[in-house]
Amino acid sequence: MLKGVKLASVLAVASLALAACGSSSDTAESAAPTAAASAVKVGMAYDQDGKGDGSFNDAAFAGLSKAQTDLGVEIKEVNSGAGATDAAREELLTLLAEGGYNPVIAVGFAYSTALAAVAPKFPETTFAIVDSVVDSPNVGSLIFAAEQGSYLTGVIAASASKSGHIGFIGGMEIDLIKAFEAGYNEGARSVNPDIIIDSKYMGPAGDNTAWNVPEKAKTATDGMIANGADVIYAAAGGSGLGMFQSVKAAGAGYWAIGVDSDQYTVPALAEYKDFILTSMLKRVDVAVYDVIAALVNGAPLVGIQAFDLSKEGVGYSSSNSAVAEYAAAADAAAAKIASGEVVVGTTVE
Amino acid sequence: MTYLKSHRFIGSAFTAITMLSITRTITSNGDLTSTVTIAQALVFASPIALAGLAGIWAERAGVINIGLEGMMILGTFGAGWAGWQWGAWAGVLAGIIFGAIGGLLLAVAAVTFGVDQIIAGTAINLLALGTTKFLAILLFTNAPGGGQAQSPPIKGKIPVFTLDSIVEPLTALHEKGIFFVSDLAGLVAGLFYNMSLLTIITLLLFIMTSYLLWKTAFGLRLRSAGENPWAADSLGVKVVQYKYAAVVFSGMLAGLGGAYLSIASTIYRNGNTAGRGYIGLATMIFGDWRPGGTAAGAIMFGYIDTLRLIDTGNQNVKGLILLGAIILFTIGAWMLRSSRRNTAIGFLLLGAVMIGAYFSATSFPPEVAQVAPYITTLLVLATASQNLRPPAADGVPYRKGEDH
């Protein structure tokens, strides 16, 4: 029996150790030699599995690496890992702050609770959080007007649709993603008031698997296409791949619209690029770069920082030349939103 | 099907189609029995069914396999890793091998060392999760088209068959909306539409399992290791070897289930199993540790998932509510006859509540459909637990020569 207990404990310890390896792989890189070496050390905490998602986290990394080359800052990156608890996230942020990293940037709304607990303990450190508001004098809350960018993709979708029927695939059913849907619907209806819009979420609030189920997103998209939809927009993280697969299988005449990064140029999605009409760009890279640049210039960005159309914090991509046909309509809508003539709502009626 | 009493099978299939057909006619929602729904339900059901079948193999030999989820994760990873480099079939093979490694680990811990099986299985789940994440960062980060959390796309495809000569006339028949006939047509056409070779393999594995475990001397010995290993040992059965074989094969099946998932979504992605190993375990209990019931449970999960996802007008969930009510009424009426009055009244009342909900609400939130399979499993456990019979020595550590 003793042997058995020993083995069990070895297994348990080994698995915990490996789980730890998996969730926080640190890839510190030293400052690039091109710019004058600055004393600023940037700590970056990604959500879920970090870089390589071809979307949200990669966009944050793009801003970080731009700061590294342009401003010569030193960087340190950590991942929360999927399903991380608030306690684990607190620990990551505390470690970065204690290690002298300033600013510390938390990528993703999932860090809200943890950051609210950690920020007051390090009043000298500037923190930033993407996609959430944390009320503390040393935190910059980077908010994106995703509904405005989605409005533009809605305009493009409705203009490109021949059947007068489009679709939306959401990840987790939370207010953050519903804002994408709301803007998309509003934009589409501004072009065609009678347009039919199908909508489907991959999971309810709290169901973290919603971001990782491409096979379900594929089935949902298949259902929409069978029902007559010909342009589909997904804001569903890793599940979005399923939409691209389904649209590609449907063939010419069907379009997919990507999200966060310019998915037309993402290598992992290269085989679907001919079907990616455009992507709603959420310029997390711009926001991350701005936070770092502000600190380097000695004027930290704190409080609510809204990145909307007027600041080019959101937009649509035009790397697929097919979108040129609809660009005029989208740009006109963008001008109206920027001037305040159109106010886009964030809730689905 | 060799061992199944064929009249019972035909009878329950007939009842099921009739109930589906009544629901379809009342709701006039063709999706409920359409070719596409059935075909997709089989795709969603297969990984769950394989996990459930893996559970049957381990538990029939007396080893509780909580580690199914972990073995499935290993399978998804193996398929992504090998599939990206050497094609889909290599991926299937690697998924099976990776799953077998997980099974072997459980066998060593639970059979050789007699570790508490629940703890050993949980350790495997944690170990698989951590190892695959670690390896994904190591192997996929710099691979073209890969990332820290996902593999590059799997090369090549597993053949998928569509028999147009059967599907087209039957689908046309389905669209006519004739009671029973059209529904049967849709169900049959679904079996010949986009049928993956892996789904066929899954089906064959179920048939093979029913035959091997219940019709051969090998199966009798294996099951005796799960019912009464001491008695089996006294009759000369090599209990430990049978347990090893069963648990490793269980790992292979779970690994195949994982590979199925990776191939269906063309990549490995962290967290892609989304708890299907545990759902497989639930279907095994739902199915009374037998292949037929387990397959039915898995198809129920797959069917409901499909209807929820392809639903574009929020009508499918409503249809499912009605279907649930009809099923409850049927079971309730059947129970009244077999004089289990209290349970029967409970079923009839619940059915009445669902009928009321069906006629008073215009649509239901999709979450209702998501929890439906779990509620069904709970209902089965609550009402049929006297009839469910797990192997007698399931979860009991066995030591050769020890007195019982």
Image (cartoon, coloured by chain):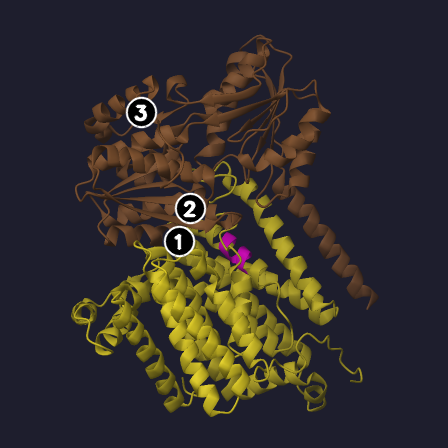
- Indicate the chain coloured yellow by its letter: B
Q: What predominant SS class does the magenta segment belong to?
A: helix
The chain coloured brown in the image: A
Q: Which amino acid lies under the numbered mark 3 shown in the image of this protein?
A: Val
Task: Please state the extent of the stretch shown in magenta in the rendering.
Answer: B72-77
Whether residue B42 is visible to the viewer of this picture, yes or no, is no
Q: Secondary structure at mark 1?
A: helix
Quadrant (top left, top right, bottom left, bottom right) of the C terminus of chain B: bottom right
Work out how far the residue at label 1 is from the one at label 3, CA to CA, in angstroms: 35 Å
Q: Which mark is residue A216?
A: 1
Q: Chain of mark 2?
A: A
- Earlier in the chain: of badge 1 and badge 3, it is 1
Asked if residue B94 can be seen in this view, the reply is: yes
Compared to residue A3, the image places residue A26 above or below, namely above
Disc number at residue B83? none
Q: In the image, residue A226 lies at what x, y percent?
A: 24, 54
Residue A133 on the magenta span? no
Chain under disc 1: A
Q: Which residue is mark 3?
A: A342
Q: Earlier in the sequence, mark 2 or mark 3?
A: 2
Q: Please state which amino acid type lies under the numbered disc 2.
A: Ser
